[in-house]
Amino acid sequence: MMEREAVGRAFRERYGRAARIFRAPGRVNLIGEHTDYNGGFVLPMAIERETVVAAAPRADRTVRAYSAGLNEELSFDLDHPNPPRRGVWLEYVEGVARALESRGLKLSGADLLIDSDVPAGAGLSSSAALEISVGLALARVNGQEVDGVTLALAGQQAEHTYVGTLCGIMDQFVAALAKERHALLIDCRSLEAEPVPLDTTSAAFVVSDTRVKHELSSSEYNVRRAECARGVELLRERLPGITQLRDVSVADFQKHSGVLPDPILRRCRHIVTENERTLGAARALRAGDLAEMGRLMYESHYSLRDDYEVSSPELDVLVEIARGVPGVLGARMTGGGFGGSTVSLVRREALADFERALSEGYERETGRRPAILVSEAGAGAAEVMMSDE
Ligand code: ADP
Ligand code: MG
């Protein structure tokens, strides 16, 4: 990964002119998993890993994008759409450009140079970091402002229409709107968000990447979405007012879950209880109650493992090793599941022991080494102001 300044220099070398620099972060979700597309609550924070985009406008309607990580340049014409779902990374760029135009922003062409230290496919949402940094760059070099929620919706639209991932709004929302030293409690229905201060003086959030990505993830994701929708249909016989699982309280669920066959019942139970855990987690963090936060993280993991069935053996191994280390307050899988990463809440004085136990234990059980990242909560997307070269 280049320094931000170096991304600007690389742009000048490649395209022979000056650029403006934009960035958007990866994220880790602390709690609230698979709740976003059910209209519920999520509690992610941005991490100190980012995608940086150097950008300058063009007189024509061509967008050229060079990815330094992949050492590949691809381009498209804003007037002649490529067919979607070809499985190329340019779809994230083209998708967000088209989504912004469909929302009324008039874009010119642009040259883009992209560099990132958000690992792809590790559950840290490199795709949202890419969409949001590129979307902000395309708007701004055209002299247009775009608010964070619109930018997030455009990023999500890119995934839905171009990439073919029916994701919720969490990743794009937090990449666009995160606040330093805060998690963001997002109401995924109203699209309102509250920053929740994170006091990490005594404990830190640690991301551990299994380095395994199972092929199941996207097909099973769509199956879970359908199971939740079916659950709403069945529960509506008893609770006619509901439109999403978000509307179902734990008490109502317990009263009426008898109408649900297995596995729909367990899928819905995860969502309903996870919403309650997420609100509880935000309260615990506000109150500085890290022990309660950690307890909710473990509960979330077991619910994802047993009820929602989106964990993997590697994720379970990481959580169980973490659980055995004194000073670890909580751990859970994070992101969509079937591989990717866990997030753990670890007392500062236990960090070294934790990293050692995790590396050794995980290698012993799986033959792989986990990638471990301790990160403070970073800021959302922004233009990077450069001192004069
Ligand atoms: P995640 O968002 O969890 O990292 P995804 O599968 O949603 O995983 O997104 C990863 C994809 O995003 C990559 O396969 C690639 O197509 C695209 N991508 C991410 N970062 C970059 C980058 N720096 N350059 C080009 N493409 C990227
Ligand atoms: Mg993604």
Image (cartoon, helix red, strand yellow):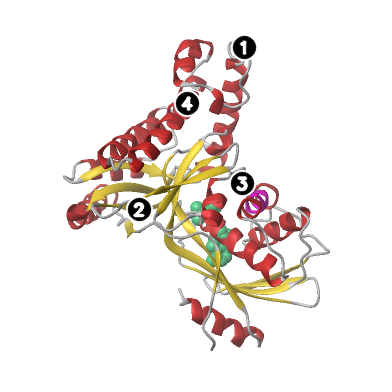
> What number is the disc on residue 207?
2
Q: Secondary structure at mark 4?
A: helix
Seen in the picture, residue 17 relative to 182 is either above or below; the reply is below
Q: Counting residues from the N terminus, which is met first, the one under dot 2 or under dot 1?
A: 2
The answer to the question of whether label 1 and label 3 lie on touching residues, with beta carbons closer than 8 A, is no
Tell me if residue 308 can be seen: no
Residue drawn at x 54%, y 54% as measured from the top left: 177
Q: Counting residues from the N terminus, which is met first, the one under dot 4 or under dot 3?
A: 3
Q: Secondary structure at mark 2?
A: strand
User: 10 Å neighbourhood of mark 3: few (<14), some, or many (≥20)?
Assistant: some
Residue drawn at x 46%, y 77% as measured from the top left: 3
User: 10 Å neighbourhood of mark 2: few (<14), some, or many (≥20)?
Assistant: many
Disc 1 to disc 3, C-alpha distance: 30 Å
Disc 2 to disc 3, C-alpha distance: 24 Å
Residue at the disc numbered 1? 237
Tell me if residue 372 can be seen: yes
Residue drawn at x 72%, y 57% as measured from the top left: 100
Verify whether residue 140 appears in magenta.
no
Q: Secondary structure at mark 1?
A: loop
Q: Counting residues from the N terminus, which is met first, the one under dot 1 or under dot 3?
A: 3
Please provide percent x and percent y for residue 89.
62, 61
Disc 4 to disc 3, C-alpha distance: 23 Å
Residue type at mark 2 is Val
Seen in the picture, residue 354 relative to 51 is either above or below; the reply is above
Residue type at mark 3 is Thr
Please provide percent x and percent y for residue 120.
49, 59
> What number is the disc on residue 272?
4
Residue at the disc numbered 3? 165
